[in-house]
């Protein structure tokens, strides 16, 4: 079993409190999967600056396959962050080398050789998905809270497992939304509600799961770690209820620290 993470990587910088760390949607999900025992490959582009060196060294240390992590000529992407209580606040995003990131035929073939491919809304991998899906490789996609983003419709025919963040809690709107996505192509559609847990639809019934109580230090990485836990369960053919529970457990361990994964 192995997973390919294709998409973004960046450095989150908390200038006001003097913290920073390597991150990015697919990096966080990938490292959390690796820590759960699933071998992970990262397909992305980082910069040839000090932050890029830090990214490469970090992913090596965590044991990920970085054979398809390209080094671009320029700065590594940076997101300037702040905190409001225990919640993260996104500030300016400097795209750096990700502005010109592309995935070539070799990247696509390499991704498709894995048991599962995961990407996210800002990963710029949407153009690669048709070719990956054509090879029969399942695809997981993190749409964050952008339920009405054009990429939801554009990628729907190619995505097996869709993940969405929804701020309204379980209601008729999100239930209808999840049903629609499975009816039109996905195998499983999952929504997370923060402290109210998660909900999934597989075409037959809904599955819900609460959170795992923990002392929250910072909510950074909660979504990516939840997805890692769910994908771990899927890859191990666990029942959907157990997949959601694994996601909740993984997220609980991450929000207890001020990092996107447990060191």
Image (tube, grey):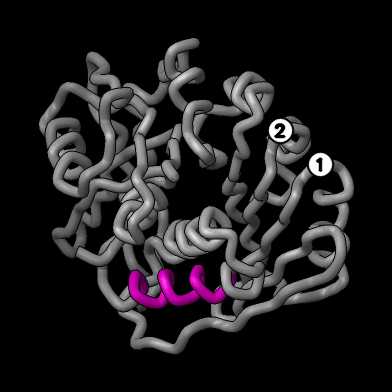
Q: Quadrant of the N terminus?
A: top left
Front one among 201 and 166: 201
Q: Which residue is mark 2?
A: 158
Q: Secondary structure at mark 1?
A: loop
Q: Earlier in the sequence, mark 1 or mark 2?
A: 2
Q: Main secondary structure of the magenta part?
A: helix
**Location of residue 141 in the rendering, given as x and y in whole percent from the top left corner:** 60, 44
Q: Which residues are magenta?
A: 244-255
Front one among 224 and 106: 106
Q: Residue at x 78, y 63 (%)?
A: 201
Q: Residue at x 72, y 51 (%)?
A: 147
Alpha carbons under labels 1 and 2: distance apart: 8 Å
Q: Quadrant of the C terminus?
A: bottom left
Residue 53: image quadrant is top left
Please state if 118 lies on the left or on the right of 76 as rendered.
right
Crowding around mark 1 (Cα neighbors within 10 Å: few <14, some 14 to 19, many 20+) is: some
**Location of residue 247 in the rendering, given as x and y in whole percent from the top left corner:** 50, 68
On screen, 167 above or below 209? above
Is residue 91 at least partly visible in the picture? no
Q: Give the label on residue 22, or none.
A: none
Please state if 21 lies on the left or on the right of 94 as rendered.
left
Please state if 4 lies on the left or on the right of 45 as rendered.
right
Q: Residue at x 77, y 33 (%)?
A: 157
**Location of residue 174 in the rendering, given as x and y in whole percent from the top left corner:** 79, 65
**Location of residue 83 in the rendering, given as x and y in whole percent from the top left corner:** 33, 67
Q: Which residue is mark 1?
A: 185
Q: Secondary structure at mark 2?
A: helix
Q: Are marks 1 and 2 in contact (CB under 8 Å)?
A: yes
């Amino acid at each position: 079993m192995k997973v390919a993470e294709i998409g973004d990587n960046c450095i989150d910088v908390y200038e006001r409190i003097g913290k920073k760390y390597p991150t990015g949607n697919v990096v966080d999900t990938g490292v959390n999967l690796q820590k759960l025992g699933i071998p992970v490959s990262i397909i992305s582009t980082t910069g040839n600056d000090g932050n890029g060196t830090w990214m490469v060294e970090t992913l090596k240390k965590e044991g990920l396959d970085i054979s398809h992590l390209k080094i671009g000529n320029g700065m590594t992407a940076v997101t300037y962050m702040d905190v409001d209580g225990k919640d993260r606040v996104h500030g300016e995003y400097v795209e750096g080398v990700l502005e010109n990131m592309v995935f070539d035929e070799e990247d696509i073939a390499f991704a498709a050789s894995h048991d599962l491919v995961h990407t996210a809304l800002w990963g710029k991998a949407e153009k690669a998905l048709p070719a990956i899906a054509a090879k029969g490789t399942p695809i997981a996609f993190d749409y964050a809270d952008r339920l009405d983003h054009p990429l939801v419709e554009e990628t729907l025919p190619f995505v097996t497992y869709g993940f969405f963040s929804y701020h309204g809690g379980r209601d008729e709107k999100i239930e209808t939304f999840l049903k629609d996505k499975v009816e039109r192509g996905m195998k499983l559609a999952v929504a997370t509600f923060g402290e109210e847990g998660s909900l999934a639809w597989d075409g037959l019934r809904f599955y819900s799961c609460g959170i795992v109580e923990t002392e929250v230090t910072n909510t950074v990485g909660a979504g990516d770690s939840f997805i890692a836990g769910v994908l771990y369960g899927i890859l191990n053919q666990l029942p959907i209820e157990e997949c959601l529970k694994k996601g909740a457990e993984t997220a609980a361990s991450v929000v207890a620290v001020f990092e996107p994964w447990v060191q």
